[in-house]
Image (cartoon, helix red, strand yellow):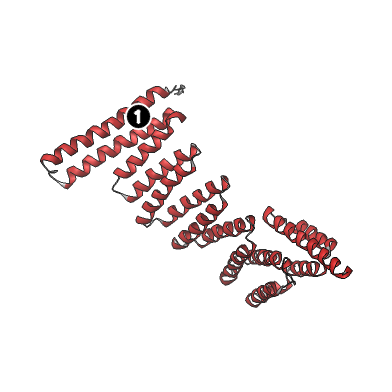
Amino acid sequence: MRTTLRAVSIDPKECKEKGNTWLQRVRKHRDSDNKRHNHIHFETKQSYELSLLAELRFAVLAAEAFRIAGEQCWYDSAKAYALAASLSADQSSKALFYSEAGKIAEKMDNIAFSTEYYRQAVTAHCDALEFKAAALLIVRMAKNYAKHDNLSASIEEFEKASRFFSAAGMVNEAEQALEKVAYLLGKTGKFVESSKTYKRLAMSQMDRNTKIFNAPRYALRSAILLCVDASSSSPLDFSGVQDLIDEICKKDCRFIESRELAFIHDILYAISSTDLDQFADCVYSFNEIAELDDMMLNAFEEMRENIVSNKQTKQITRRA
């Protein structure tokens, strides 16, 4: 038997009217309950819970109707979902409705509006001991902040997400969030803080010995970001970089023979000798083997400018 599919046209105005009708039913129901409270209490706890469930159902139906009505009613839909969340006694359901409100507010490109609901959803997830769900929402907020170029807020949220993933026993996800923190710190020019975070990731990987191939990459990033800071010092001071290298080699002797350590030594020599040609060759050659991302390229550009400055200082000193 063949099934015939027919297109269904949606009238936004009709959907909006339905939404308003459901909201009016919520208000009438609440007004009726308030009048009952003025005279008698609910006969049983069950009758009170049933009353709340009715209001919750009306609020959800209103939110869905507004959502279907389209962009012009998204604000009303978000508010209705938030109302449903406030009426829900179950923390998981409360978190779900606040999350829906946040997603709709997010579509409106109103980050403050969406974040307000996401934070309430996170609180409800925590009350329900649902740390994984809470962490995922925090990651969503962090990405939204990054999309709006608020990198400091994004860093803060990714740090929170890492802690929540840890609480949920999700070590890999916790480290992924922490890697985002390290990357964004580097992007904002906080090279020393970024280096410390990458070092923390490298040590964690070496302790677990489950992703040993990631450890040299994190160690490299940590050392190079310290080199940026060291290259701007006067006189040049690589003691922090050397201490980091010694600590990593002590933790994992395989790092001694790694291409990453050889690259770090080449970079240190180029900085010390203010040899821009060698510096450029080193970076180019390593990038051919393991492509560097924009944050690392920015760090190398900062380093190159420091080398140029150091070279000019040397030339002035010789002439004097």
Furthest-right residue in this view: 319
**Whole-percent x and y of residue 318?**
87, 70
Residue type pointed to by label 1: Gly
- The residue at the point 14 percent across, 38 percent down is 36
Q: Nearer the viewer, residue 231 or 157?
A: 231
The residue at which mark 1 appears reads as: 19
Furthest-left residue in this view: 39
**Residue 166, above or below 239:** above
Q: Indicate the quadrant where residue 117 lies.
A: top left
**Whole-percent x and y of residue 97?**
37, 43
In the shown orientation, is residue 49 left or right of residue 219? left
- The residue at the point 15 percent across, 37 percent down is 35
Q: Indicate the quadrant where residue 114 lies.
A: top left
Q: Indicate the quadrant where residue 78 lies.
A: top left
In the shown orientation, is residue 32 left or right of residue 264? left
**Residue 149, above or below 203:** above
**Whole-percent x and y of residue 247?**
64, 76
